[in-house]
Structures are given as structure tokens and as C-alpha cells.
Image (tube, helix red, strand yellow):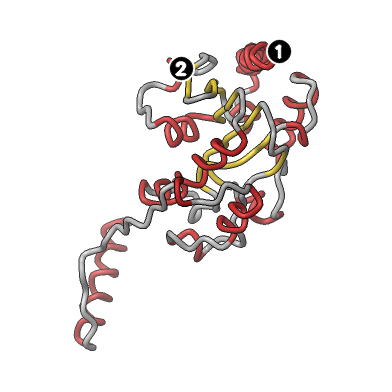
């Protein structure tokens, strides 16, 4: 099937070439903005995120999602990227994943969603079911870095291996660090399973509960 699709694509490219089109090798843009040049106001930073066109994800998104919650939160949740349900609803804590995360916050941590800050490493929904490219992750990295600088959370919780990898740059086995307390600048980083992964693997909820107790202990 892949061979047939590749052949059809190649034939189409040759057809376009005969019509005068020229091709060049793709270029990975380096359009990163230093977090030092971003505004110190969370509201202004959110406007910058909503108006961002640094990567191709801006072409397929309904909107950028900058984050939600308390600007003085002691606890920040960082997801990897905006889900299709979040992009569709233009809201947070939606779908099965969102409901479970809300339950974790309200029923285990005994906080309100307004007490914490929830954001994404990549502020837009990826194409289809693809993971964001390295370039797309890098384009968003200064925004997340600046959010952390402004909010100064005591604890940062990354949801799932992708969020942990994007934020920390650590490519090692996620299970090695899950539930651990990792110094991260002026904060503590605690990786845990993604809520959607727990929905699909309910047998892991006991481990997640222990991780939540670890998080709770660091907020006392």
C-alpha cells in the first residue's frame, strides 16, 4: 500500500515539474523566541500565544490554548499538547482525560481547578494523530519557560512521557522517573501517568494515587 502511494505521489510530482514547478529541500525554520524577550505579564504572554504563527500547527488549529488557572498557583500541570477534544471545545478539562484530571485535583489533592495552573508544552493541536515535530516543540518552548518563570510553581507535574520529555529533554525510560521528585530550577518536577493512559489502563490507578500523594506532600 505504501509503495503504491509513493509511486502515485512521485508521478504527481513529475507531472507538476513538467508544468514548471520547482522543488527545494525542506527547511526547518529556527524561529524560536528567547523567553527573555517575552512579556512578564501573564495576560500579555497569553495574547502572544493566541497570536502565534511560528510553526505549521497554526494552520490547522482552531485556536492556541495558553493555559488556565491561578497565576500564583503552587501546582502546575503540564500536558504534552492540546488534544482534539480541547481544540474542538476551546476549553480545558474536557473528554475522559479531562474528567479524570479534574477528579485527581478535586478528590485526591483536595484543590479546585482554579487553584492550580494547567497548560501544555505545545499550545496547539498536532496534525491528525501525529506527535509534534522537534521544531514545533522548540517553537513553543520559550512560552512554557516564561509561564514557569512568571507563576513560580512549587511543583510542576508533567502528564505522561511526552510532556516530561519535551519539558526536561530527558530521553531515558519514563518509568525510571515516574513519581520521582526532581529538582527543576526553582521548582520540583514530578512526572506521572497521563490521565488518558490511566483511563485505558485502570490497573495503574494505584500507582497514580501514590504519585498524587507524593505531589500532595510537597505542597504542604
Relative image position of residue 5 (x, y in whole percent): 31, 63
Specify few, some or many for label 1: CA neighbours under 10 Å numbering under 14, 14-19, or 20 or more: few
Distance from Cα at disc 2 to Cα at disc 1: 22 Å
Count of all numbered marks drawn on residues in the image:
2
Q: Is residue 36 left or right of residue 73?
A: left
Residue at 23% from the left image edge and 70% from the top image edge: 10
With respect to residue 47, does 166 lie above or below?
above
Considering the image in quadrants, where does the C terminus appear? top right
Relative image position of residue 128 (x, y in whole percent): 50, 54
Visible in this render: residue 203? no
With respect to residue 101, does 15 lie above or below?
below
Residue at 39% from the left image edge and 47% from the top image edge: 138
Residue labelled with disc 2: 177
Of discs 2 and 1, which sits in the foreground?
1
Sequence order check, earlier mark of 2 and 1 = 2
Residue at 47% from the left image edge and 30% from the top image edge: 164
Relative image position of residue 149 (x, y in whole percent): 54, 36
Q: Which mark is residue 220?
A: 1
Relative image position of residue 9 (x, y in whole percent): 29, 69
Amino acid at each position: 500500500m505504501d509503495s503504491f502511494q509513493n509511486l502515485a505521489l512521485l508521478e504527481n510530482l513529475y507531472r507538476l515539474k513538467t508544468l514548471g514547478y520547482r522543488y527545494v529541500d525542506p527547511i526547518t525554520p529556527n524561529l524560536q523566541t528567547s523567553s527573555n524577550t517575552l512579556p512578564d505579564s501573564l495576560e500579555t504572554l497569553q495574547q502572544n500565544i493566541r497570536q502565534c504563527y511560528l510553526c505549521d500547527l497554526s494552520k490547522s488549529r482552531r485556536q492556541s490554548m495558553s493555559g488556565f488557572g491561578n497565576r500564583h498557583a503552587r501546582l502546575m500541570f503540564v500536558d504534552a499538547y492540546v488534544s482534539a477534544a480541547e481544540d474542538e471545545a476551546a476549553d480545558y478539562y474536557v473528554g475522559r482525560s479531562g474528567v479524570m484530571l479534574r477528579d485527581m485535583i478535586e478528590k485526591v489533592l483536595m484543590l479546585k481547578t482554579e487553584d492550580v495552573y494547567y497548560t501544555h508544552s505545545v499550545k496547539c493541536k498536532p496534525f491528525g494523530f501525529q506527535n509534534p515535530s522537534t521544531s514545533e516543540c522548540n517553537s513553543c518552548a520559550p512560552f512554557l519557560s516564561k509561564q514557569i518563570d512568571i507563576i513560580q510553581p512549587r511543583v510542576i507535574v508533567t502528564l505522561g512521557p511526552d510532556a516530561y520529555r519535551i519539558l526536561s529533554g530527558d530521553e531515558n525510560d519514563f518509568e525510571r522517573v515516574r513519581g520521582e521528585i526532581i529538582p527543576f530550577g526553582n521548582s520540583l518536577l514530578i512526572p506521572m501517568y497521563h490521565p488518558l493512559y490511566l483511563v485505558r489502563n485502570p490497573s495503574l490507578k494505584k500507582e497514580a494515587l501514590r504519585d498524587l500523594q507524593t505531589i500532595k506532600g510537597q505542597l504542604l
